[in-house]
Image: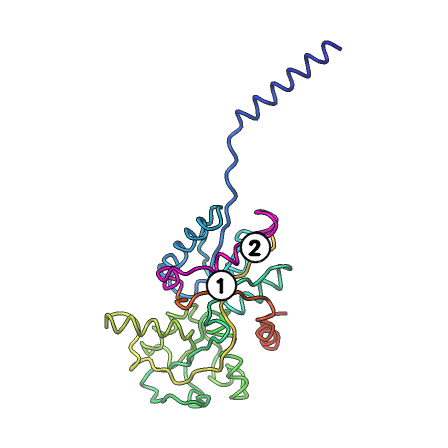
Amino acid sequence: MKIDRALLACASLLALFLASSAPPQKPKVLRFTGIPNNNTTELEAKYKPLAKYLTEKLGVPVEYVPSADYNASVDAFTNGDVLLCWFGGLTGVQAREKVKGARVIACGKVDPQFHSYFIANKSTGIEKSDSFPMALKGKKFTFGSASSTSGRLMPEYFIRKFAKMSPAEFTGREMSFSGQHDKTAALVQAGTFDAGAIDFKTYDGLVELHKKDTSKGIDPEVCRVVWVTPNYPDYHFCAHPLIDEVFGSGFTDKLQAALVAIRDPVLLKGMDREDGLIAANNEDFDALRGVALEIGLVR
């Protein structure tokens, strides 16, 4: 029995030694990303200050992870490589179809009433109209990303609704995709494409940039808005259900509160949401999901 006690004592000392000599555990990191709807430099400027704010507010390390394209954002969220994402309406719907329990938690005040611009090069001679621009029929047209809500899903929906044709039938060619909103504007301004569909905030921002420096941005006299679409819900933050498992019960609610509480005008301007963020939920995007199902972009 004495030997057993001695062995037990040795084992306890060994366990204490191993515990004290083991390297300290690294803190859990909340990684997030956003769909790359514009150039990567803008995204870095947008998300790194947000990561710093959330780190301070939540008391855990928060890290921005860039995504190569829209699909990569959805894949990273689906795989749990990132637990928070700034999605567009369509990519958010696609992600939630794959990740049961994922939650929409916030969006910009502007996002429930979002819209797209149909733009055209001045050489087309097409003027702005309140009605759908049938004059674009047969023109060389580019969408944004194939997974973009404002650059593809809703513009395609409105073409089908008002022209009673598929995009291929309407333009007379296969659908073309620029990949990003700012590229759509640049291609239309250059005349590479006659027309295109773009996120209105991106276009307005590029016009403002051109006013400050005519060598940059978009000249609205050359790259014209010819139609403003009806409104629809779009961008939003979506939280992975693993957040509460990793960081503790109720952490998603804490994250939502931190986002909605942002008041720093510099941070909001960097996110292109100067009016602030509001709470949102999955049901806010039910109608958009219906459109995606109708067109076949969600199954």
Quadrant showing the N terminus: top right
Look at the magenta stretch and give its main secondary structure.
helix
In the image, residue 176 above or below residue 96: below
Q: Could you tell me residue 77's position as x and y percent? A: 55, 56
In the image, taking residue 260 as reference, residue 96 lies left or right, namely right
- Give the Cα distance between marks 2 and 1: 23 Å
Q: Are marks 2 and 1 in contact (CB under 8 Å)?
A: no
Residue at position x 49%, y 54% in the image: 32
Q: Which residue is mark 1?
A: 70
Return the x and y of residue 206 as percentages of the image width and height: 33, 72
* Secondary element at image label 1: helix
Give the class, few, some or many, for how many residues have Cα within 10 Å of label 2's Cα (few <14, many ≥20): many
Residue 217, placed above or below residue 27: below
Question: Residue 247 in magenta?
Answer: yes
Q: Which residue is mark 2?
A: 252
The amino acid sitting under disc 2 is Thr
Image spot of residue 41 (x, y percent) = 35, 59
Q: Amino acid at mark 1?
A: Tyr
Callout 1 environment at 10 Å: few (<14), some (14 to 19), or many (20+)?
many
Q: Which residues are magenta?
A: 243-271
What residue is rendered at 38% in x and 81% in y? 119
Task: Assign a secondary structure to mark 2.
Answer: helix
Who's the residue at 45% across and 90% down the image? Answer: 131
